[in-house]
Image (tube, helix red, strand yellow):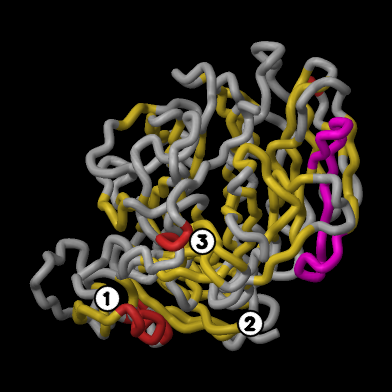
Amino acid sequence: MKKIKTSFLVLALCAMNQMSNAQWLTKASGLATPQRGIHEMIAVNNNVVWAMAFDFNEPLLPLNEFTRTTDGGKHWTAGSIAAFPDYILLGIAPISGTTCYANMFTLNNGNVKIVKTTDGGATWTEKLNYDFPPDNFNFFSDVYFFNENEGLAFGDQTDGYFTIFTTSDGGNNWSRVPEANMPAAIAADEASYQFSAEGIGNTFWTVTTSGRVWKTTDKGLHWNAYQTSETSIDYSNLKMRDALHGLWGVQGELYRTSNGGITWDEITPAGNWFTDDLAYVPGTAATFVSTGGHDFSGYGALHGTGSSYSVDDGNTWITLDTGVEHLSIAMVNPFTGFTGGLNTDSVTGGIYKYHGPALGYSCGNNHTYMCHNGHTRCVANNKILHHLFHGDYLGACYPNYKAGEETSGDLTSDNESSSVNIFPNPVSASTTISFSLSQSEKVSVKIFDMTGRIVNTLADGEMQEGAQQVEWNVTDEKGNAVDAGIYFLKVDAGSFSKTQKLVIER
């Protein structure tokens, strides 16, 4: 089963139930059967994370089991897709705490299904049923949704070309992408590869077993494929931080792209880069986290077990811990993230929650550098949210700040041109952000949530001198309506920087 990535766990269960160092706290996955690991973990927002399970005793095959949290990882609720007991779970595409799509497969006859829940996994309904040719182990490796309505399923070859379906109505109807809209397979055995896909905006990337990166920029309607220096994939994870930049770990090698996945340059990383999974840290310039689970027949911890992070796009890795089984990972922001572990029972183990300093902003002893009223402070980790709520931000007040120095000064200019107005605020459906520029310059307008995660980038480019207006329809980067609560608008230009609070009411 060369297309399924997994990890085989041999660490004693008692070790898994301890705090894996001050950086990670152990949480109960809620999975009732002992020795359940996590194949895939996806964060929807600060509070909602979904994950799918696998069996320690059969590590090369997933299960029909999942778990999720809706309170930021404090509690996890496990379940199974009982409506289809003969099918195993191969992928998930969560939209919210209640809505999620799942990709399922049965060994009996090669039949695959896309199913959907709208009640947090209590019940599931079939949305797509597809029969691959008999006698072939074929399936959809990826299911992904760009927003509540538009999604795709990417699978192996049938009829001589790759099987890709798209939907634009929440999965009610699916259309197979025509052969003319995609590259030809380069070999009869070129197949899709599980757990190695990424989506940003309208763009989606995945890889095949022949070492090609497949990419669509129009939500799956048309595709291109780019050959890499790898020609046979047995272990892979690809993670992008924006439309151009990303990392790809494959068979113990680490690659980086700066042109959207068209070409990849091999990196020789310094420090401990772990090979089980990768995650970009939202809200950072170039920070990734790597995890390592135990090596089993070429899968998992080719470079050991543990976790580490890089703030320079993978060149240098800083160890968080070693000798601990960290499986799939989802990062929410620089100071919140989750990895899969191995449970003992429903109330013991299975999930790790990051509890250390904001990655890249540590000032030692579980403290984080933050800019508070124009002064750089060393803030206790449990005070980060409080400071964000009051308009402070992670990191030093000036880019040239050096550790150990106290810096004063306000990034916000007092001149009239730096005034930023939001109307209406509080916001229910949409709001207008107005400001004026004293000269033509590059401007960034971004919305952040209370944890510092980028919710939406409204503008990022050159603007002309004079009055400017930017609209926000209270959605995230995928077009989904954001939850009610407190958010922050940050406007950065060459001449000023402003952060203001937004209140979303529903």
Image coordinates for residue 78, horizontal then vertical, percent: 69, 66
**Residue 346, located in which quarter of the rendered image?**
bottom right
Image coordinates for residue 360, horizontal then vertical, percent: 28, 61
- Does residue 52 show up magenta in the picture? no
Identify the mark at residue 457; answer none if there is no mark: 3
Q: Earlier in the sequence, mark 1 or mark 2?
A: 1
- SS label for mark 1: strand
Q: Amino acid at mark 3?
A: Thr
The magenta region covers 105-124
Residue depicted at 39% across the width and 31% down the height: 252
Q: Nearer the viewer, mark 3 or mark 2?
A: 2
Residue depicted at 66% across the width and 60% down the height: 33
- SS label for mark 2: loop
Q: Amino acid at mark 1?
A: Met
Residue assigned mark 1: 370
Residue assigned mark 2: 484
Contact (Cβ within 8 Å) of mark 1 with mark 2 = no
Give the crowd class for mark 3: few <14, some 14-19, many >=20 residues within 10 Å. Answer: some
